[in-house]
Amino acid sequence: MTKNFAAFNVSDYLDNEETIAEYLTAAAEDENSDVLLAALSEVAKARGMAQVAAAAGLGRESLYKALAPGSHPRFETISAVLRALNVKIALIPASSTTP
């Protein structure tokens, strides 16, 4: 018996700022920087890639390239994308268990 499942698309669940912030925070904690880039890409897709690119001051294709696995975007680019997504970076001591 074969079962068909719908493909999981994380961007379907990124529908509010709190969920987005939690998702990006978890991704940022991973040692592999591609995890954060992939998460940013998923959030941008959920919000509309063209809209996020425009709000970040980037072209749509530039945004895709900046968030591609293995890319090394400048901090200014990531900061602009985060502002466009209406989230910000918060730093806490590594020994802290709660933000």
Image: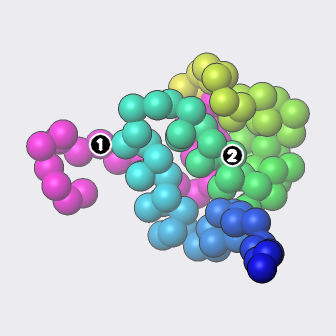
Pick the residue in front: 77 or 69: 69
Q: Main secondary structure of the magenta part?
A: loop
Q: Residue 31: within the magenta?
A: no
Q: Residue at x 76, y 66 (%)?
A: 7
Q: Residue 97: within the magenta?
A: yes
Residue 23, above or below 37: below
Tell me the magenta residue range.
Answer: 77-99
Rendered-image quadrant of the N terminus: bottom right
Q: Residue at x 75, y 50 (%)?
A: 52
Residue 79, above or below 1: above
**x and y, in percent, of residue 35 in the image:** 53, 39
Q: Is residue 96 left or right of residue 3?
A: left
Pick the residue in front: 72 or 75: 72
Viewer can see residue 69: yes
Q: Residue at x 81, y 58 (%)?
A: 48
Which disc, if any, is residue 30? none
Quarter-of-image position of residue 45:
bottom right
Which residue matches tag 1?
Answer: 91
SS class, disc 1: loop
